[in-house]
Structure formats: C-alpha cells, structure tokens
Image: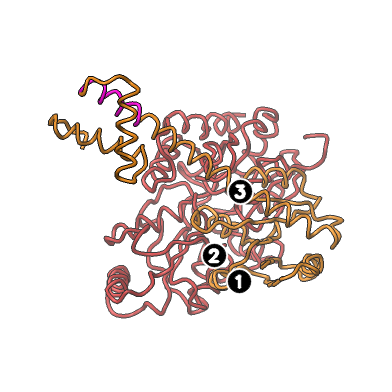
Chain colours: A red, B orange
Amino acid sequence: MSPSGPLQLGFIPLVDAAPLIVAQEKGYFAAEGLSVSLSREGSWATVRDKVAAGALDGAHMLAPMVLASSLGIGSETKAMIAPIALNQGGAAVTLSTRLAGEGEAGARLTHLVRRRQEEGASPLTLAAVYPFSLHNYLLRHWLAGLGLNPDVDVRLTVVPPPRTADLLGEGVIEGFCAGAPWNAVAEAAGVGQTVVRVSEVWPEAPDKVLGVTEFWAAANPAILQSLIRALAGAGVWAADPRNQRELVALLARQEFLDAGPEAITAGLAEIAFAGAGVNLPRPEQAVWLLEQMARWGQIGEVAIDRVAERTWRPDLYLAAQGD
Amino acid sequence: MRVLIIDPDPARAALVAEGLIGIDPLEVRIAALFHEGEAAAFQPDVVVVASESPDRDTLESLREASAVNPRPVVMFVDRSEPGLAEEAVRAGVAAYVVDGLSAARVRPVLEVAMSRFHLMHQLRADLAKAKADLASRKTVERAKALLMKERDLDEEAAYRLLRKLSMDTGRPLGAVAADLLAFAGVLKGGDSA
C-alpha cells in the first residue's frame, strides 16, 4: 500500500464497471489487503487526464483509450497499459423509434439517408460515446456494411452515455452506440430500438480494461498484482447467475449507476465478466483495435505490433494469477 | 463577448456569470447540459465547462472536428483534483483551479484563456504557412535549376526569368515554378504532371 492513503480508482457509471464496484463492496480489494477509494467520473476525457496526472491510480477505461493515450492522439502522450481486461460485450447500436417501420432496420436507415441526400436535407446525426471506443468502431463498421460512409453520409457526434436516451427522445440524435444499460434504458423509455449488438459482430472484442500508467505499474508492482487478482475475483462473482439479484441492486445504487434495475438486468445479459479468455489482455486484441483506429484515420503509420506488445500485458495478468 | 457556461452546479455557474459583469457587450448563457444545436445558434466566444461535467467528451470531440470554427474551452477544476488542471492544459483545454475562485478573478481567467487560445491558433497558422513557404522555396530552386540546364542560363538570369513570368501572369513565384516543373515533365513524357 502506498503510505499516502487509499488507492484511487475511477469508473464511469456503466454496467461493465461491475468488477470495480463488486471488488469494493464484496470485499475483494480488502481480501488482497488493498484499501481503495472509488471515484465516479463524468467523462472519459477526465478519466484519462486524472490517470495521466496521477490523481487516479487507475481506472475503468475504454480499451482503445489506453492505446490513444500511449500514442498521444487526442491528448499528450502518456504511456498506459492494460494489465487485465474487464469484460466483453455490452455495446450496441440503438436507433430512434421514429425510424421504425417495415423491413430491416439497416435497410430503412440507408433508404432514409439516401432520400435526405436527394432532397438536400441535413444528414442524420448519430452518436458514439467517445472517439476512441469500440462503440465508435462498431457504429462505423455497421454503417459501412450498409454501404454508407460514416464520415460523409451521416454526422457522427459524441454524447455521454447517460444522456443518450434523452437526446434520442428529443430528436437531437437519431441513433447511438453505447454500453449497457443505456440501450435498454432507451428501449424501456420507448424512444429507441436496439438494432445490432457487438456480440453479433465481434463477440471477442475487448470492451473495458483496467488502465494504469506504465510509470505507476513499474512503481507499484505488488499493488498491481493484488489489484489484478481482486478484479478477476470480482469478475467471477459478477458472472455467477446466483449473484445476479444482489449485483443488480448494488449497481443500481445512487452512488454507482443510479439507473433502473430492469435496464441493468437487461444489460448484464449481454456482458461476460469472466470465463475463457475474457480477462487475459492478449496483444492480438490491441493489434485488432489499432487496425480499427487505422481504418478510420485516427492513426497513421504506427509500429502496430510494438505498440500492442507494450500496452497489452498478459505477463502481468498471468503473474498475478500464478501467485 | 458571448460566454456559454456548462455547469450542473447553479451556484458556481452564477459565480462565473457574476465575475463577467462589467464586460460590454456581454451575453451569458448558463446551461446544466451542453446542447450542440443551441451552442451553434448562440456562437459563444468562449465555453466554460465544469471538470465533472459529462459534456467534456462532447466538447473535446467538437474541438477536434471543428478546425474551421475553433473556440476556446475553459475548464474549472476543483482543488481536490491534484494535477488535473495541468493535464487538461496539456490536452489543449485552458483549465483553472476553482477552489477559492472569487468573482473578481473570473474575467482575467477568461481573458487569459482566450488570448492564449488565439495565440496558439495564430502559431499553428504561422507554422502551416512557414511549411508552405519552405515547400514553395524548394519548388523555385528546382525550377531555377531546370531553366539553367535547359536554357543554359546562369542562376541570376534563371531567377529573373521566373520573376518575370510571375509578374506577367500575376501569380505567385512558387505557383509559376510548380507549373514550369509540371509542364517540363509532360514535355519530357514524364509522369510528374
């Protein structure tokens, strides 16, 4: 333990923050001798800045954020690593019920986009939760599969997850890609309809990871090992169906997600917190994410393999499990 | 000056607004949440956002996307967040520590942020121009070398010829030189056109 006080870990109110919340509330941190203070954050940019500045020791992060920060895109360069992956699944694209109608949702969207172009109307606005996120890449990939160019045929914007349902209802956006529980929240509010889930497209894509700076990891190797074990144990607890009622009640609490239990339950059905290959951060995943970033012009010439080896650290995960 | 304040804490937003009194002309809009359509209609000169606002991600993505219409973003940060202000500054947001912020300090903070933003904007524009100038000078050197070789001129005469072409056509020297090189490529059957 650092003598200066408890570890500061950040999270964004999402179902996939469960491993941190469970580790804290069900005693997995305590069992490893860790004293932790969880800090609920409002934006990914603030999570990034706080981890980079050392105001947080680590955080629940979008997997591509670790890469963006290490490469210095969107912010100053700060070498970060992912020593454990927290979950797979949960991201989904939800379109406004205003676009509902006969036939397949994608075909309807394409038709509408083309019609608006012929009429000279403004492009439809769709939102992702952050530029460097699986959600952005899923939305773009799905649009590209419909024959649409996400940079030309629609307008893409960024919206914080808790506001997606409201903005969809107000007509500010016509669709979004976000994590759980926000797709279910939009459906429950009657404003949106989920049209594609990441599990149908990229079932093994890493969603959130624990992000820490390379500097912090090197300075605190023992604490990091304890942290990895606590989060892995909490993931197993969260994945156990027998614990689901308790987990839903825990996440729904005001200081955590502050969202309805039904939407959280629906979100949990989409997410894997443990199981074969879920938590091991494999560099191939980072390579794949870097390829997505390159596909959409976020990075240029980059030594992909070297960046992946340096940021995704299965060695640290395996060393922690080996104790 | 038009100021858009995004802060879920009305008391702090009011403090910021109070500090702006005396600026003339002044239009302040306070919102708990950022609304892109309203912001576009309002055309703020500066956006003030609280560090804990979820809208930071939206503002940051707008800043990246809106190279055509950049505007400074000022962020107020609590003193309880060590290092965050410095980190945000490096990320391109002007950030200020809010704890103990008095209304009297708001105005200078915004003015410093805006002038620094415009300075950075100017520096970026200057850098782009310097790069273009350098490229243009290289083109002129190559065109001069071509004329010296093909027309058997000395350096001085080749330059005078380029200058004359530039003045006769009313086009910049770099553009005339680039044309010359392109045409030379075509005439030689090369692919530089």
Q: Is residue B149 magenta?
A: yes
Q: Residues within 10 Å of mark 2 (few under 14, many from 20)?
A: many
**Image vertical order of residue A54 relative to residue B145, above or below:** below
Does the residue at mark 2 contact the one at mark 1 (Cβ under 8 Å)?
Answer: yes
Query: Mark 1 = which residue?
Result: A260
Q: Which residues are magenta?
A: B140-150
Where is residue B31? Give x, y as percent: 67, 72
**Image vertical order of residue A31 relative to residue A251, above or below:** above
At 54% from the left edge and 58% from the top edge, which residue is drawn? A241
Mark found first going from the N terminus, 2 or 3:
3
User: What distance separates the C-alpha of mark 2 from that of mark 3?
Assistant: 16 Å
Q: Secondary structure at mark 3?
A: strand
Query: Mark 3 = which residue?
Result: A60
Q: Amino acid at mark 2?
A: Pro
Disc marking residue A181: 2
Q: Secondary structure at mark 2?
A: loop
User: What distance separates the C-alpha of mark 2 from that of mark 1?
Assistant: 9 Å
**Image vertical order of residue B125 relative to residue A41, above or below:** above
At 38% from the left edge and 69% from the top edge, which residue is drawn? A123
Where is residue A151? Give x, y as percent: 37, 57
